[in-house]
Image (cartoon, rainbow, N blue to C red):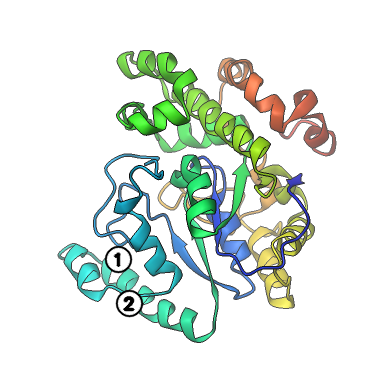
Amino acid sequence: MVDSQQPVKRREPILVTGMHRSGTSWVGTMLCAGGDFIHLPEPLNVLNRQTILPSRVEQWYTYISDVNEEVYLPHYRDALAFRLHPLQNIRNARLGSPRDPFRITKRWMSFPLGRIQRRRLLIRDPFAVFSSDWFVRRLGFRVVVVVRHPLAVIGSLKRLGYAFDFKNLLTQPLLMDERLSHFRSEMEAMARARTDIVDQGCLLWRAVYDCVAATQARDASLCVVRHEDLSLTPVEGFGRLHELLGLSFSDRARRTVDQHTREANPNEGSKTNPFKVSLDSRANLRNWRHRLSDEEVDRILETTRPVADRFYPNDGADVLKPLRGILL
C-alpha cells in the first residue's frame, strides 16, 4: 500500500518518519540510493549531539509547532540551504569520541556537495512524526510515513530493551493539547505504573499512528507506506515509491535496493547494530515470532486493533494473504 495523490513534479525536500523501529532508516537509505539527496539523520534524537540544532533536544518525539518554532525554524532552513556551522559542530563534539569527527567531516563534505550538485535534502527522523504538519507548512517538505505492523515494531522494541517513558510526551503541553489529548489519561497511568515494554509499545504505536491517520485525513499529499509491502517486493515497491515522489529509479537505485534486501542477506541485524539496513527483507517479516510469546501476541493485537484496522483492514488480510503465517 502506497497511499497518496499522483506523483509530484516539484523538487521538495523529503521527511521520512514514523514510529521508531518502524523502518525509517531502511526506507530513507533506499530513497537516497539514486544519489538525488543529501541524507540527514534524526535531528530530533535525544542522543544526537552532532545535529543541525545548536543543542540536543530534551524529550523524545519533541513537538514543533508555530508556537515554539523560533527554536528550530532557522536551523532547518539553514539545512535546506546546505549552510554549515563549523563552530557549532566543534563545540558540540564529545572529547575523545570516535564517531563525532567522522560525522562532522561527513557533513562538511556533503553540504557543499549538495549545493554544487543541486541535490535535495532528505531528513530521516521518526521523532518528527507528530510535527509532520509543521514540516509541510513551514518548510515545504513532502512527508513519507512508514507504517509497520505493531507485532513487528513491539517485537523489535522488546528484543532491544527499548522502554519508553511517557513523561517525554506528557511534559510537552502543546503536543498533548494539540495532538494527544485523548491519550492523556492512559499515558498518565502508564507513567505512574510499572509496565512492560509490550504495554508501552502498544500505547505509543496507537498514539503515533492515530495521529498519522488524522493527518492523512486532512492532507492528501501525505505519503503512507507499509513496511510489509516494501519488504515483500522491495524492488517493485521502492520503484513505485520513487515514481510517486518524482524520483528516477535508476539502475544504480535498483541495484542498491536489491543488494540490501536479497535472500542472501542476514535474517536480522545484531543487537549491537540495530540500524542495519542490509537484510533479507522477506525473512525479516518473521522475526517477531521468536521475540514475542503467544500471550504477548494476543495482547498486542487486541490493544492496537482500533488503530491497526485503519492500516491493516480485515485483520490485515491484504498483507497476510501472500504471507500465510509470516505475520499472524
Badge 2: how crowded within 10 Å, few (<14), some, or many (20+)? few
Amino acid type shown at disc 2: Thr
The answer, for residue 189, to whether it is visible in the render is yes
Q: Nearer the viewer, residue 71 or 283?
A: 71
Residue at 34% across, 69% down: 103
Considering only order in the chain, which callout, 1 or 2, is on the residue closer to the N terminus? 1
Within the image, what quadrant is residue 76 found in? Answer: bottom left
Residue at 79% across, 59% down: 236
Please tell me whether mark 2 sits on a helix, a strand or a loop: helix
Rendering coords of residue 260 (x, y %) = 63, 62
Rendering coords of residue 315 (x, y %) = 76, 24
Labels 2 and 1 touching (C-beta < 8 A): no
Residue at 70% across, 49% down: 231
Within the image, what quadrant is residue 291 found in? Answer: top right
Q: Which label belongs to residue 159?
A: none
Badge 1: how crowded within 10 Å, few (<14), some, or many (20+)? few
In the displayed structure, does residue 164 sit left or right of residue 38?
A: left
Q: CA distance from mark 2 to mark 1?
A: 10 Å
In this figure, what is the number of numbered marks? 2
In the displayed structure, does residue 5 sit left or right of residue 298?
A: right
Residue at the limit of the structure toward the right, as seen here: 321
Rendering coords of residue 211 (x, y %) = 55, 32
Identify residue for label 1: 99
The answer, for residue 328, to whether it is visible in the render is no
| Above/below status of 202 relative to 31 | above
Q: Nearer the viewer, residue 187 or 138?
A: 138
Q: Which label belongs to residue 105?
A: 2
